[in-house]
Image: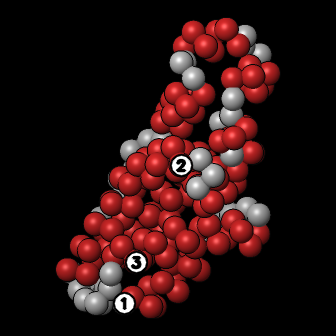
Amino acid sequence: MALLREGGPGSVNVQAVAARSGVAKTSIYRRFDDRGELLRTAIGSMVKPPTEAPVEGTGERLAWGLNQIEAVLGEVLGPGGVAALMDNREPEFTRLVRRLVKPYTTALAGLIDEDIAAGRLRSDVDADAVVSLMVGAYVGELARRGRVARGWERPFVDLLLHAVS
Protein backbone atom coordinates (compact mmCIF):
# COMPACT_ATOMS: atom_id res chain seq x y z
CA MET A 1 0.00 0.00 0.00
CA ALA A 2 2.92 2.34 0.62
CA LEU A 3 4.07 1.77 -2.95
CA LEU A 4 0.61 2.69 -4.24
CA ARG A 5 0.33 5.79 -2.03
CA GLU A 6 3.75 7.01 -3.10
CA GLY A 7 3.88 6.19 -6.79
CA GLY A 8 0.48 4.99 -7.95
CA PRO A 9 -0.47 1.56 -9.25
CA GLY A 10 2.40 1.49 -11.74
CA SER A 11 4.85 1.26 -8.86
CA VAL A 12 3.15 -1.85 -7.48
CA ASN A 13 4.73 -4.93 -8.97
CA VAL A 14 5.91 -8.21 -7.53
CA GLN A 15 9.57 -7.20 -7.54
CA ALA A 16 8.90 -3.91 -5.73
CA VAL A 17 6.58 -5.58 -3.20
CA ALA A 18 9.18 -8.27 -2.54
CA ALA A 19 11.90 -5.66 -2.04
CA ARG A 20 9.75 -3.47 0.26
CA SER A 21 8.31 -6.34 2.30
CA GLY A 22 11.29 -8.67 2.47
CA VAL A 23 9.12 -11.53 1.19
CA ALA A 24 10.46 -13.69 -1.62
CA LYS A 25 8.94 -13.16 -5.06
CA THR A 26 8.13 -16.87 -5.22
CA SER A 27 6.05 -16.56 -2.06
CA ILE A 28 4.12 -13.66 -3.55
CA TYR A 29 3.51 -15.56 -6.80
CA ARG A 30 2.20 -18.54 -4.80
CA ARG A 31 -0.53 -16.32 -3.34
CA PHE A 32 -1.28 -14.02 -6.30
CA ASP A 33 -1.55 -14.97 -9.95
CA ASP A 34 -0.40 -11.57 -11.18
CA ARG A 35 0.15 -7.93 -10.31
CA GLY A 36 -3.53 -7.11 -10.91
CA GLU A 37 -4.70 -9.63 -8.35
CA LEU A 38 -2.10 -8.38 -5.87
CA LEU A 39 -3.29 -4.80 -6.32
CA ARG A 40 -7.01 -5.70 -6.15
CA THR A 41 -6.50 -7.71 -2.97
CA ALA A 42 -4.41 -5.05 -1.27
CA ILE A 43 -6.82 -2.20 -2.06
CA GLY A 44 -9.91 -4.31 -1.37
CA SER A 45 -8.61 -5.25 2.06
CA MET A 46 -8.10 -1.59 2.97
CA VAL A 47 -11.48 -0.24 1.85
CA LYS A 48 -14.03 -0.92 4.56
CA PRO A 49 -17.77 -0.25 4.36
CA PRO A 50 -18.74 3.32 5.26
CA THR A 51 -19.07 3.99 8.97
CA GLU A 52 -22.44 4.85 10.46
CA ALA A 53 -23.52 8.33 9.41
CA PRO A 54 -24.79 10.85 11.94
CA VAL A 55 -28.55 10.81 12.22
CA GLU A 56 -28.98 14.54 12.71
CA GLY A 57 -27.28 17.70 11.62
CA THR A 58 -26.83 18.35 7.92
CA GLY A 59 -23.40 19.87 8.52
CA GLU A 60 -22.29 16.87 10.54
CA ARG A 61 -23.57 14.54 7.85
CA LEU A 62 -21.69 16.44 5.14
CA ALA A 63 -18.53 16.42 7.26
CA TRP A 64 -19.01 12.67 7.74
CA GLY A 65 -19.19 12.31 3.95
CA LEU A 66 -15.97 14.25 3.45
CA ASN A 67 -14.25 12.13 6.07
CA GLN A 68 -15.42 8.97 4.30
CA ILE A 69 -14.06 10.30 1.00
CA GLU A 70 -10.77 11.12 2.70
CA ALA A 71 -10.60 7.61 4.18
CA VAL A 72 -10.59 6.06 0.71
CA LEU A 73 -8.74 8.66 -1.33
CA GLY A 74 -6.25 9.78 1.29
CA GLU A 75 -5.65 6.85 3.58
CA VAL A 76 -6.00 4.05 1.05
CA LEU A 77 -4.92 5.51 -2.31
CA GLY A 78 -2.70 8.38 -1.22
CA PRO A 79 -1.40 10.99 -3.66
CA GLY A 80 0.02 8.39 -6.06
CA GLY A 81 -3.24 6.47 -6.31
CA VAL A 82 -5.31 9.65 -6.65
CA ALA A 83 -3.06 10.89 -9.45
CA ALA A 84 -3.44 7.60 -11.31
CA LEU A 85 -7.20 7.74 -10.83
CA MET A 86 -7.39 11.27 -12.21
CA ASP A 87 -5.50 10.54 -15.41
CA ASN A 88 -6.94 7.04 -15.89
CA ARG A 89 -3.38 5.81 -16.26
CA GLU A 90 -4.51 2.24 -15.67
CA PRO A 91 -8.16 1.68 -16.62
CA GLU A 92 -8.48 -1.52 -14.57
CA PHE A 93 -7.28 0.37 -11.49
CA THR A 94 -9.72 3.21 -12.20
CA ARG A 95 -12.63 0.77 -12.50
CA LEU A 96 -11.61 -0.95 -9.26
CA VAL A 97 -11.43 2.31 -7.33
CA ARG A 98 -14.75 3.57 -8.71
CA ARG A 99 -16.39 0.31 -7.69
CA LEU A 100 -14.93 0.52 -4.18
CA VAL A 101 -15.87 4.20 -3.76
CA LYS A 102 -19.46 3.69 -4.93
CA PRO A 103 -20.88 2.62 -1.53
CA TYR A 104 -19.49 5.83 -0.01
CA THR A 105 -20.83 8.14 -2.69
CA THR A 106 -24.18 6.34 -2.76
CA ALA A 107 -24.54 6.64 1.02
CA LEU A 108 -23.63 10.33 0.90
CA ALA A 109 -26.08 11.06 -1.93
CA GLY A 110 -28.75 9.24 0.08
CA LEU A 111 -28.12 11.45 3.11
CA ILE A 112 -28.32 14.56 0.97
CA ASP A 113 -31.58 13.34 -0.57
CA GLU A 114 -32.96 12.72 2.94
CA ASP A 115 -32.05 16.28 3.96
CA ILE A 116 -33.71 17.63 0.81
CA ALA A 117 -36.88 15.62 1.54
CA ALA A 118 -36.89 16.87 5.14
CA GLY A 119 -36.60 20.48 3.98
CA ARG A 120 -33.14 21.00 5.49
CA LEU A 121 -31.67 21.60 2.01
CA ARG A 122 -33.17 23.40 -0.96
CA SER A 123 -35.49 21.28 -3.09
CA ASP A 124 -33.55 22.08 -6.28
CA VAL A 125 -30.26 20.65 -4.95
CA ASP A 126 -28.83 17.78 -7.02
CA ALA A 127 -27.39 15.26 -4.56
CA ASP A 128 -25.03 13.72 -7.15
CA ALA A 129 -23.65 17.16 -8.04
CA VAL A 130 -23.01 17.88 -4.35
CA VAL A 131 -21.19 14.55 -3.99
CA SER A 132 -19.02 15.37 -7.02
CA LEU A 133 -18.29 18.79 -5.53
CA MET A 134 -17.24 17.15 -2.28
CA VAL A 135 -14.93 14.66 -3.98
CA GLY A 136 -13.50 17.55 -5.99
CA ALA A 137 -12.93 19.54 -2.81
CA TYR A 138 -10.74 16.78 -1.44
CA VAL A 139 -8.78 16.41 -4.68
CA GLY A 140 -8.47 20.20 -4.96
CA GLU A 141 -7.09 20.49 -1.44
CA LEU A 142 -4.57 17.77 -2.20
CA ALA A 143 -3.57 19.45 -5.46
CA ARG A 144 -3.23 22.91 -3.90
CA ARG A 145 -1.31 21.97 -0.79
CA GLY A 146 0.19 18.54 -1.45
CA ARG A 147 -1.64 17.18 1.60
CA VAL A 148 -5.00 17.48 3.26
CA ALA A 149 -4.73 18.91 6.76
CA ARG A 150 -6.84 17.78 9.69
CA GLY A 151 -9.95 19.93 10.00
CA TRP A 152 -9.92 21.01 6.34
CA GLU A 153 -13.53 19.93 5.90
CA ARG A 154 -15.14 22.38 8.33
CA PRO A 155 -14.75 25.59 6.26
CA PHE A 156 -15.82 23.68 3.15
CA VAL A 157 -18.93 22.30 4.87
CA ASP A 158 -19.86 25.78 6.10
CA LEU A 159 -19.55 27.17 2.57
CA LEU A 160 -21.45 24.26 1.06
CA LEU A 161 -24.28 24.60 3.59
CA HIS A 162 -24.57 28.27 2.73
CA ALA A 163 -24.92 27.36 -0.96
CA VAL A 164 -27.44 24.52 -0.62
CA SER A 165 -29.58 25.54 2.36
Quickly name the residue at label 2. Answer: 91
Residue count near mark 1 (Cα–Cα under 10 Å), binned few <14, some 14–19, many ≥20: some
Residue count near mark 2 (Cα–Cα under 10 Å), binned few <14, some 14–19, many ≥20: few
On the image, which quarter does residue 148 sit in?
bottom right
Residue type, numbered disc 1: Ser
Quickly name the residue at label 1. Answer: 165
Quickly name the residue at label 3. Answer: 129
On the image, which quarter does residue 48 sit in?
top left
Question: Which residue is located at x 52 percent, y 86 percent?
Answer: 159
Q: Earlier in the sequence, mark 1 or mark 3?
A: 3
Question: Which residue is located at x 53 percent, y 18 percent?
Answer: 33
Q: Earlier in the sequence, mark 3 or mark 2?
A: 2
* Residue 56 seen anywhere in this rendered image of the structure: no
Of all residues, the one furthest to the right in this rendering is 19
Residue type, numbered disc 2: Pro
Whether the residues at callouts 1 and 2 have beta carbons within 8 Å, the answer is no
Residue count near mark 3 (Cα–Cα under 10 Å), binned few <14, some 14–19, many ≥20: few
Q: Nearest the camera: 22 or 116?
A: 22
Q: Earlier in the sequence, mark 1 or mark 2?
A: 2
Quadrant that contains the C terminus: bottom left
Say if 56 sits above or below 12 in the image: below
How far apart marks 1 and 3 lie (CA) works out to: 15 Å
x%, y% of residue 62? Answer: 43, 71
How far apart marks 1 and 2 lie (CA) works out to: 37 Å
Q: Nearest the camera: 98 or 138?
A: 98
x%, y% of residue 126? Answer: 33, 81
Question: Which residue is located at x 38 percent, y 54 percent?
Answer: 102
Q: Which mark is residue 2?
A: none
